[in-house]
Amino acid sequence: MTSPVSRRGLLIAGGATAAAVAVGATDTSFAATRTAARVPSLELARQARTGADVVIAWNQALLRIVRTAGLQPPTVHPTRSFAILHAAIHNAVVATTGQGTPYLFAVHAGPGASPVAAAAQAGHDVLVALYPAEAADLGRQLAAELSAVGPGHARETGIDAGRLTARLLLDLRAADGSSVVPPPLEPGTDPGQYRPTPPANAPAVFTHWSGVTPFLIKRADRFRPQAYPDLATRRYAAAINEVQRLGQNSSTSRKSDQTEQANFWAAPIWNYWNEITQTAVRAEGNDLVRAARVFGHLNLAVSDAVIAFYDAKYHFRIWRPITAIRLAAADGNHSTTADPDWTPLATTPADPSYPGAHSVVSQTAATLLSQEFDPRLQLAVTSELLPGVTRRFRSLQAIADEAGLSSLYAGIHTRLDHYAGQELGHNLARSVLARPELRP
């Protein structure tokens, strides 16, 4: 361990993989169009004296950023930002309350340090570092939250703790592989192999993401689902025939509720699960320590799930339904029928089909959150893309099931992709839950 360095009341001691830091040691429902989940972060900041609101306010700030065109770098996955943000907030809250297990390193604040000030400063500093163009808006949010705390030793010591946790987290992730230039993917030519899809025929995205350093798991390839079935099998034919029938843009077999599901869940799925978590946190006590831990656990796990599903996607490199259906004459399966003009309800994302991203992320989130909250927690969720449209669920698993299968009705995934995604997500979440980080 290096020698302690004292600077502005901070006693810092660190090792190669972890650090212990003393700071100031000498001194519920989504039903409405504007729901609790979507209250502007600055408005929440003015309320953030106690409880989970300070955590939710910074979560909302990042949701606003990633929903604004042009602010999220196109080759950096947004789940990385959510993970760094909430890991820093969690560690800042642990530092100032002494409650919970920190992520990777401990920061010890002096007596009486404000956890709200610490969480606010940590959230601010992470997001300014990741999105410097948003510094002015983020600064206004921080000022509102610190004003609610009030001046004094508690606020200043909390600020120091939050600032330090943010810097340490950002330093730890500075060389995590996320800035690597994505390598081009050679399009497949054999039946079953992935190739770019209409209408844009864009090159594959996030081809580098499986190489990003995970936050909690050790290796992404440990969670690959079972191998894709042979194209000549009945399983394959059944899956392709189902999406061909239900996922076509002008399908007469798809029920109106299935069409709504496809459109309802079409936005980035991690956004939904962060909002679902906001509602669950408020429904079960609005506690600051618990909120920081739950959001940290969720987003570290989801970020790792994204790394793992890109590993699986580019390992198997399975063609998308639009390709499989249009080229079915070449698949060697007499139970499939080619339709050269077949078009899905939704535009197909530019990456391989297996496993399904919505299914992976949703199963990861549902499995993890079911350990934090009543798994039968009843929730109403509103769509990011269909304002005012609400869907109600009797359990977290029901949300995961519907979100995953929505991609089948959209025509961009098969049921095989869905089940493989649930397998990956469940196994990854169970592995994360067995780890010591972020335990109560």
Image (cartoon, rainbow, N blue to C red):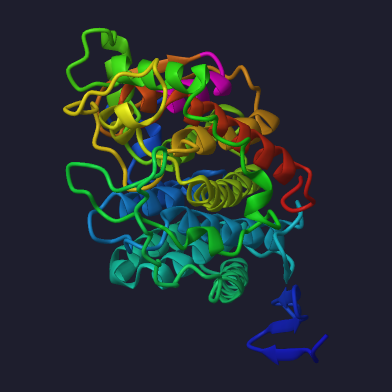
Magenta stretch holds residue 400 = yes
Please tell me whether residue 320 is drawn above or below residue 163 in the rendered image: above
Q: Position of residue 199 (x, y in %)?
A: 17, 42
Rendered-image quadrant of the C terminus: top right
Question: In the rendered image of this protein, does residue 379 appear above or below residue 361?
Answer: above
Queried whether the magenta region covers residue 407, the answer comes back as no
Front in this rendered view, residue 85 or 109: 85
Q: Is residue 256 left or right of residue 273?
A: left
Position of 100 compared to 333: left or right?
right
Query: In this picture, is 6 found above or below 266?
Result: below
* Number of numbered discs: 0
Q: Measured from the top left, where is residue 293 in percent x and y? A: 65, 47
- Residue in front for this viewpoint, 184 or 92: 184
Magenta segment's dominant SS is: helix
Q: Position of 404 compared to 370: left or right?
A: left
Q: Is residue 416 left or right of residue 74?
A: right
**Direction right: furthest residue:** 1
What residue range appears in magenta? 394-405
Q: Give 189 or 202, whichever is nearer the viewer.
A: 189
Residue name at image x 70 percent, y 31 percent: 371
Q: Residue sitting at 70 percent across and 60 percent down?
A: 103
Whether residue 236 is visible, yes or no, is: yes
Name the one closer to the observer, 26 or 118: 118
Residue drawn at 47 percent across, 29 percent down: 231
Q: Is residue 277 visible?
A: no
